[in-house]
Amino acid sequence: MIISYDGTDYHGWQRQDGKDLPTIQQVLEEVIAQVARHPVSLQASGRTDAGVHAQGQVANFFYSGVIPAHKLAMVVNAELSRLKPGRQDIYLHSSQEVPDDFDACGSAISKLYRYSVYNHLRRFPDCQRRAFYLPAKVDLDLMLKAMPDLIGTRDFRSLASSLCDKKDTVRTVLRCDIYRKNHYLYFDVEGTGFLHNMVRNIVGLLLDIGQGRRAVDCIPAILAAQQRAASGNRAPANGLCLQWVRY
């Protein structure tokens, strides 16, 4: 399944058993189980955090229902629309049968996250759910000069969450594009995999550079420190969206 969702009202993708907190996985598993008439357990391409969105999340599960796989998305969407009439915040773009050895996470080659910043003095209500509002002046050229130091295979421990428990913090960033469109700044980060909060910390660091709070050439020293405290601000969750996953 390819899934879009507005994560504003959810505590991330992953089901949190024993806690009365709505998650994307929980809602989808319950609705799909009703349609399929058997329990389901979703495997996603990655676990988005509370408040983070998706345009192209991918998830798979074992299915033995009677509705053809390619029609399942349509039926599930009909059920989802009844949960929040007038504002469906989880939507299935498509569903299809895949080989038994397909794994939405393990089979992925790369993922692209897009971070959106509304960069204007005047705030508009419709941008607040899906973009970080930043009224300060940001120099795009400074960020573009700093960006190459983030591309390639590097140890990104300094740009992971302080709670990250991964022993191997080496990851590969394939590209990082920054561009303006009207009053928005967009950060597109593609990689083979990401650490917890890594993209939000990358954006926060680049925005600090763009506002003159950090030197353009600061990134190598920050990565070498291998400490979260070295990297500074983390961008808020509401601006981040998983755009697509490549297989």
Image: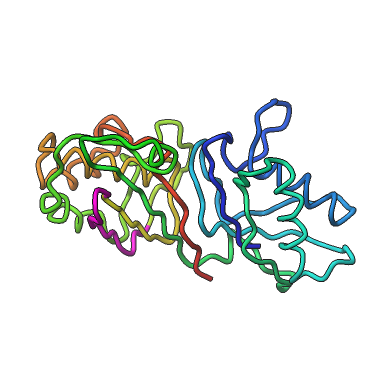
Q: Residue furthest front?
A: 86
Where, quadrant-wise, is the N terminus in this rendering?
A: bottom right
98 sits to left or right of 57: right
Q: How is the image coloured?
A: rainbow
The prevailing secondary structure element of the residues shown in magenta is: strand
User: Which residue lies at the image location 51% right of the left edge and 52% below the top edge?
Assistant: 54
Q: Is residue 245 left or right of residue 81?
A: left
Q: Nearer the viewer, residue 245 or 196?
A: 245
Asked whether 109 or 85 is in front, the reply is 85
Position of 88 with respect to 126 (left or right) is: right
Q: Which segment did they paint magenta?
A: 172-184
Residue sitting at 12 percent across and 55 percent down? 145
Q: Residue 179: horizontal and vertical position, in percent? A: 23, 57
Residue 236 place in picture, x, y as percent: 37, 35
Q: Position of residue 92 (x, y in %)?
A: 64, 58
Q: Which quadrant would residue 148 be assigned to in this image?
A: bottom left
174 within the magenta span: yes
Residue 13 part of the magenta segment:
no
Give the number of callouts: 0
User: Vertical placement of 245 versus 80: above or below?
Assistant: below
- Please report the residue visible at 29 percent of the width from the left and 39 percent of the height from the top: 226
| The quarter of the displayed image where residue 191 is located | bottom left
**Which residue is painted at 68% across and 40% down in the image?**
84
**Quarter-of-image position of residue 112:** bottom left
